[in-house]
């Protein structure tokens, strides 16, 4: 179920030059929207428009290396960091 305010936001986003796709992921609601843009200028325009309407954009972009196979689970690094942080003593 997509609230009318999100429909208006996404319709306006889709009219912007360089926007390939905009929508509501999952079941809808007010928790998230997305836009896929083709150029940096379009990404900047979407970000500025959404910010002016009180929508906080989380900007992500493709990795220049593309998709790659990791030999180690990247979450393992987080465990090491968590262990190191939990062992720090403040005096």
Image (cartoon, rainbow, N blue to C red):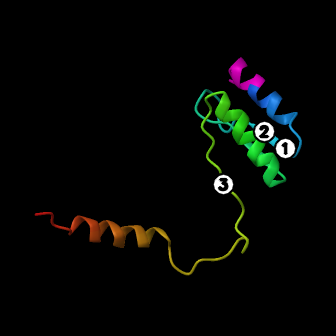
Residue 6 lies in the magenta-colored region: yes
- Residue 30 visible in rendering: yes
Residue at mark 3: 60
Are the residues tagged 3 and 1 within 8 Å (C-beta)?
no
Left or right of residue 44, residue 55 in this image: left
Q: Point out the stretch of residues depicted in magenta.
A: 1-8
Q: How far across and down, in percent of the image, does residue 90 sit?
A: 15, 63
CA gap between label 2 and label 1 equals 7 Å
Instruction: Tell which tag, 2 or 3, sits nearer the viewer.
Output: 3
Query: Which residue is nearer to you in this view: 37 or 54?
Result: 54
Q: How far across and down, in percent of the image, does residue 77 sit?
A: 42, 72
CA gap between label 2 and label 3 equals 14 Å
Q: How far across and down, in percent of the image, does residue 81 sit?
A: 35, 69
Image quarter (top left, top right, bottom left or bottom right) of the C terminus:
bottom left
Please tell me which of labels 2 and 3 falls first in the chain: 2
Residue 28, above or below 22: above
Residue count near mark 1 (Cα–Cα under 10 Å), binned few <14, some 14–19, many ≥20: some
Residue at mark 2: 22
């Amino acid at each position: 179920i997509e609230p009318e305010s999100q429909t208006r936001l996404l319709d306006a986003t889709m009219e912007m030059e360089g926007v390939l796709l905009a929508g509501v992921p999952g079941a809808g609601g007010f928790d998230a929207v997305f836009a896929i843009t083709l150029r940096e200028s379009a990404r900047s325009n979407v970000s500025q428009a959404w910010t002016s309407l009180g929508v906080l954009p989380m900007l992500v972009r493709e990795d220049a290396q593309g998709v790659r196979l990791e030999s180690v689970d990247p979450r393992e690094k987080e465990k090491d960091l968590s262990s190191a942080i939990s062992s720090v003593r403040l005096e």
